Image (cartoon, helix red, strand yellow):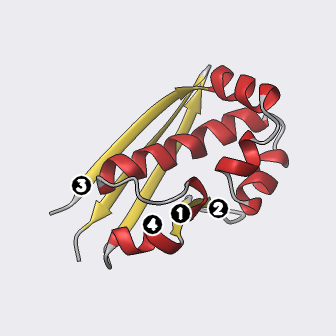
Amino acid sequence: MSSIGTDIEQISRIERALARTPRFASRIFTAGERAYCESKAHPAQHYAARFCAKEAFVKAIGEVNFSWQEVEVARGESGPPSLITHGKATEALNGRGAQVSLSHAGDYAIAVVLVEEQ
């Protein structure tokens, strides 16, 4: 059976966390995610969407036994975002695939993760 998770966050909340806690970005996001977000005109909206993706993944998988950085949102030059898992997050998938969709508008970012059965 497939499972789905979704999360929505205020971009301004993530922006405040980034400004208030310098280690927030390095604790939550991979080096690749940070490089992608920092390359954008409004990094906070991209960080917020990726934060949502990590939360949505946890909701879809039903487990929290892995670190934030073990779930990574990757994006090529053109094309949709994808999820890359590492370590315990990969083990939690147990051979299943995961799809992600991200969006942001105004002060909100949202992500939906679909975990597909084998």
Q: What element carries label 4?
A: helix
Instruction: Point out residue 75 in the picture as x, y percentages from the top left corner.
Output: 64, 61
Instruction: Point out residue 37 in the picture as x, y percentages from the top left corner.
Output: 76, 47
Q: Do the residues labelled 2 and 4 touch (CB within 8 Å)?
A: no
Name the residue tied to disc 2.
75
Q: In this view, does 107 lie above or below 43?
A: above
Instruction: Point out residue 88 in the picture as x, y percentages from the top left corner.
Output: 45, 70
Residue drawn at x 68%, y 52% is 29
- N-term-proximal mark, 1 vs 4: 1
Q: Which image quarter is the N terminus in?
A: bottom left
Residue 65 image label: none
Q: What element carries label 3?
A: strand
Name the residue tied to disc 1.
82
Mark 2 Cα-neighbour bin, 10 Å: few <14, some 14–19, many ≥20 = some
From mark 4 to mark 3, how far is it between C-alphas? Answer: 15 Å
- N-term-proximal mark, 2 vs 3: 3
Residue drawn at x 39%, y 64% is 98
Instruction: Report the amino acid beneath label 3.
Output: Ser
Q: Is mark 1 on a helix, strand or loop?
A: strand
Instruction: Point out residue 80 in the picture as x, y percentages from the top left corner.
Output: 55, 59
Q: Are marks 4 and 3 in contact (CB under 8 Å)?
A: no
From mark 2 to mark 1, how far is it between C-alphas? Answer: 6 Å
Residue 89 image label: 4
Say whether residue 95 is left or right of residue 106: left
Say whether residue 113 is left or right of residue 37: left
Name the residue tied to disc 3.
3
State which mark lies toward you, 1 or 4.
Answer: 4
State which mark lies toward you, 2 or 4.
Answer: 4
Q: Do the residues labelled 2 and 3 touch (CB within 8 Å)?
A: no
Image quadrant where residue 97 sits:
bottom left
